[in-house]
Image: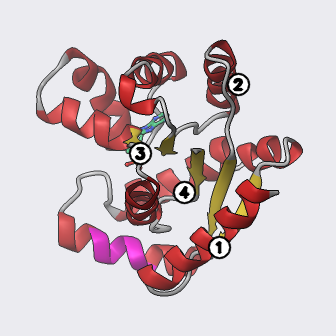
Amino acid sequence: MRLVLLGPPGAGKGTQAELLAQRHHIPHIATGDIFRENVKGGTALGEEARAYMDRGDLVPDDVVNRMVADRLDRDDTASGFLLDGYPRTVAQAEELDRLLGARGVALDAVLRFVIDEDELVRRIAARSAEEGRSDDGEEVHRNRLEVYREQTAPLEEYYAAQGLLHDIDAVGSVEDVNARAEAELASAVKS
Ligand code: AMP
């Protein structure tokens, strides 16, 4: 199973990604997590990414694409993977199609977590307080939403045109949203 998750920052995508990945025994590949590990570890990649992340801007496509290509070359992706936070631009989606095509495989489904903006602003304020994430200040979050609308939302069209896009209502408990995602996935992968 090869999956991509889409949804604005704060939609609960990371939590859902973990549950789906566990259930289907596929690695959860979260580009944001990989960047944060690199920042923490003081690597060259982390140094390169940090300023973009602190502003809530996207790290340049070529940097992210190279990182994902390396990650997809690891053996644990042989039976599938779940991408969380990638692709985030149409150029990244095109590169992903190329990467997968070169490996003779394709995506099975793209799940989009749908939520309105008022709810997002509430959630992000709560998460910021809990985790102390440096990129979740109000200003930065507003920028992250703006970046999502401008650069990532066009991917919805891109994947809808390929017949891969499936909407999941992201409002509700973790368990309810997970159940919706599993149901949607079951029908998506069957059809
Ligand atoms: P996330 O945890 O997915 O919200 O990612 C945190 C930050 O990492 C983002 O705000 C970006 O600065 C960077 N990042 C993660 N994934 C990508 C991506 N696919 N393209 C560009 N930047 C990314």
Q: Any atom of ligand 1 within 8 Å of the CB at mark 3? A: yes
The relative height of residue 33 versus residue 145 in the rendered view (above or below) is above
The nearer-to-camera label among 4 and 2 is 2
The C terminus sits in image quarter: bottom right
Q: CA distance from mark 3 to mark 4?
A: 9 Å
Q: Any atom of ligand 1 within 8 Å of the CB at mark 1? A: no
Helix, strand or loop at disc 1? helix
Q: CA distance from mark 2 to mark 1?
A: 28 Å
Q: CA distance from mark 3 to mark 2?
A: 23 Å
Residue assigned mark 1: 183
Who comes first in sequence, dot 3 or dot 1? 3
Residue assigned mark 2: 94
Residue assigned mark 4: 145
Residue assigned mark 3: 56
Front residue of 143/191: it is: 191
Q: Is residue 169 visible?
A: no
Who comes first in sequence, dot 2 or dot 1? 2
